[in-house]
Image: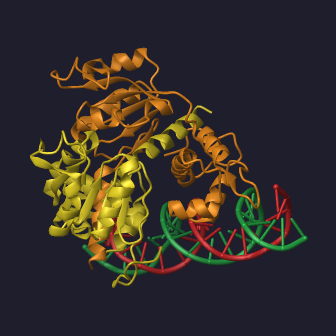
Chain colours: A yellow, B orange, C green, D red
Amino acid sequence: MGYKKIKKTEKAIPISVIKRLPIYHRYLNKLIDRDVEHISSKQLAEKLGVTASQIRQDLSHFGTFGQRGYGYRVNDLAKAIGEILGVNNKLHMVLVGAGNLGGAIINYPNFSKRGFIITAIFDNDPAKVGTKIAGCIVLSIDSLREYLESHAIDIGILAIPAEDTYEIVKIFEECNIKGLWNFAPVSLNLENVLVENVHISESLMTLAYQIKEMDE
Amino acid sequence: MGYKKIKKTEKAIPISVIKRLPIYHRYLNKLIDRDVEHISSKQLAEKLGVTASQIRQDLSHFGTFGQRGYGYRVNDLAKAIGEILGVNNKLHMVLVGAGNLGGAIINYPNFSKRGFIITAIFDNDPAKVGTKIAGCIVLSIDSLREYLESHAIDIGILAIPAEDTYEIVKIFEECNIKGLWNFAPVSLNLENVLVENVHISESLMTLAYQIKEMDE
DNA sequence: TAGATTGTTAATCGATTAACAATC
DNA sequence: TAGATTGTTAATCGATTAACAATC
C-alpha cells in the first residue's frame, strides 16, 4: 500500500490508460509499415475494439497530437506515444529460469530493439549452467545476488516455478530491484518493487469461464 | 460489438470479478497444501493485495460461502470457486506454433490436471512436422482446417508471429471455434469468437513506463 | 454471551461515453 | 467555405470501498 513517490505532474495517469498505450503504439507502427499517413480516432478505435472517445480521452492526458478535421499523422503519433512509454530508454534485465518459458521470453521478437537488454540468465540446474541461450550465458542461481550487487539491473524476469519464487524475490528485494516481470504462477505484491504479474493460467481460466457461460 | 447471448441469471457478472476468481482459487489451493482450515476475507485480502470488502463483494455475486464470525472454510471456498470457474470441465484445445512459446505453454504445470487438453500441435515449419513436443505430435498447418472440422475443439492457442495471425484466425473463425487464447503480438477483436489476448510485451512496456515515472 | 466476521446496502470513487464548441 | 474531426467538458456508467445489521 501507499505511494512510493508523488508525481510532479499535475495528475497521476490512470494505469488503465497506460495499459492501452502500447496497444495503440503497436498498431500505429503496423500502419507505418503499410505507409498509412494519417488515421482518425474513429478508424483507430474500430481496429482496436475501443471507442474513439476513449482514444482521444487517453491521449489528452499527455497533450494534443492531432489536427481537427484531419486526424492524426501516424508517424507523429507513434513517435509521441513511444516517447511517453520510453521505448528508446534502455533497461537492463536479468532472466531467472532457463526453461521453456525463459527461452520463449528471451527469444521474443523485437525485444532488444525496444531497448530491453537481458544481460544474464540464471538457473538452479547445474546441467544448464554454462550453456548459452540466444547468445547469453546461463549462470548459477547462487551468483544472482552478487551479480545484482555489481551490476545496474532495472528489471528481474521471473520464469520459475511457484515454489522457488519466495526465495528469489527476496534476493531481488534486498538488492533493490526496480521492477519484477513475474511469469511465476504466484500473485506478487511487494512494498518497494513494481511488479507486473503476467497471469498466464488465470487468463486461460477466464476464457474457459466465458466459454462455459456462452454454452449456458 | 454486441452481446452474443443474454445470460439467464439475473445479472451478468462483471469480467473484472471473473478475472480475480482464479487468483483467489490459486491461493486457496496453496492454503489447502499447508493444511490451513479457515481464513477471513481480511487475511485473504492482505495476502493478495486487494481489500476484504472486494473479496466479499466478488463472492456475493455467486452466493454465500462463509460463516459470520468465523470466515471461510478454505476447502469449501476453493471447491466453490473451482466450480464457478469450471475447473473440472474438460476443454479441448489445439496449439498453433511449435516454437519456444508453444513449448512453454504446452509444458505449463498442472495444465492437463485442470482439464485443459491439448490434442494437437500445428506448425508451418516442415522440419518440425512429425516431431513430438511433450508427447504430442506436430502436424502441418495445412491440415488445421480439416482437423478442426473433424474434431470437437473448444479453444485455439495462438503462439505464432504477428504476420501469420490473420490467416490462422480466419481458419478458426470459419470452423466456429469458441475461444482463442492469443499470444501473438496482435490485438484480436472478433465478432463471434471469445478472445483472450495475452499482451506479453505490452505488460513489459507498462512496467517500463512505471519504472521511468518512479525515477522521475 | 461477547467478539468476530460475514453478506449486503449505500456512498464514493474512477473510468468510459456522449456531446459539442473549436478549428483545421 | 463546408465537412470532418479534434480536444475537452459534462453526463453516465460501473467498480470499489465503507459501513453496519445480521449472526455464527
Q: Quadrant of residue A119?
A: bottom left
Residue farthest to the left, as pictured: A135
Q: Is residue A23 visible?
A: no
Q: How many marks?
A: 0
Which residue is drawn at the image coordinates 42% and 59% (left, top)? Answer: A188
Q: Is residue B51 above or below residue B141?
A: below
Which residue is drawn at the image coordinates 22% and 20% (left, top)? Answer: B131
Is residue B70 left or right of B169 when viewed as pictured?
A: right
Which residue is drawn at the image coordinates 30% and 37% (left, top)? Answer: B104
Image quadrant where one finds the C terminus of chain A: top right
Task: Tell me where residue B46 appears, x and y as whole percent.
Answer: 55, 65
Task: Tell me where residue A23 appears, x and y as whole percent.
Answer: 31, 55
Which residue is drawn at the image coordinates 27% and 79% (left, top)? Answer: B216
Q: Is residue B3 above or below residue A93?
A: above
Task: Tell me where residue A125 appears, x and y as whole percent.
Answer: 23, 42
> Camera-side residue: B62 or B81?
B81
Q: Is residue B129 visible?
A: yes
Task: Tell me where residue A99 appears, x and y as whole percent.
Answer: 26, 41
Q: Is residue A211 above or below residue C12?
A: above
Is residue B15 left or right of A23 when viewed as pictured?
A: right
Q: Quadrant of residue A126?
A: top left
> Camera-side residue: B39 or B181?
B39
Q: Quadrant of residue A62?
A: bottom left
Is residue B48 left or right of B206 when viewed as pictured?
A: right
